[in-house]
Amino acid sequence: MADINRDDNEIELASPPRFKYGERVIARSVIRNDGTYNGRDIGEVLVHKGEIGYVININTFLQQFYIYAVDFVDSGHRVGMRAKELCTLDNLPDDVLEQLGAKAGVLQTLGNATPTEEPS
């Protein structure tokens, strides 16, 4: 979790969580170990910008923020992140999908397991 500042005026808990269990999300920035991820050095990159993961848990921090536990399957990391560090892939607003046009269909396949071809 990066950028946790108790002085933030926003109280996220006044609203429902932005993401749901199982929702596909994408990291908006690089996430480094702040010392809370065991087995990795402080400062080591845990999640790369653009990496796709799934929300597996929702908790709170400092009675102010939601923390989303995200499973990044490709890297094998499970990391706690703030909503501002994530973007949904499953629940984009209609106007965004409209602007994406045909490219919106590609979003449906990102992060989903591709079926393996059977030998002939």
Image (cartoon, rainbow, N blue to C red):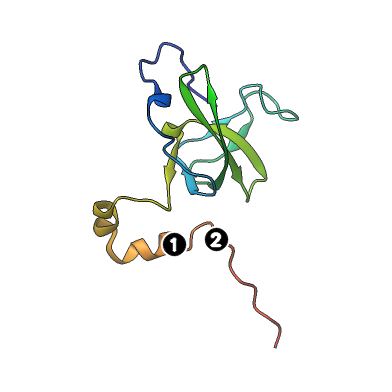
Q: Where is residue 99 in the image (x, y as percent from the top left)?
A: 24, 56
Disc 2 to disc 1, C-alpha distance: 8 Å
Hey, which residue is sitting farthest top in the picture? 7
The residue at 30%/50% (across/down) is: 93
- What residue sits right under mark 1 in the picture? 108
The image shows residue 119, relative to residue 18, as above or below, that is: below
Residue type pointed to by label 1: Gln
Would residue 81 appear left or right of 34 to someone viewing this image? left
Most foreground residue, 112 or 18: 18
Q: Where is residue 12 in the image (x, y as percent from the top left)?
A: 40, 25
Hey, which residue is sitting farthest right in the picture? 39
The image shows residue 89, relative to residue 115, as above or below, that is: above
The residue at 44%/35% (across/down) is: 17
- What residue sits right under mark 2 in the picture? 112
**Residue 69 image label:** none
Mark 2 touching mark 1, by CB under 8 A? yes
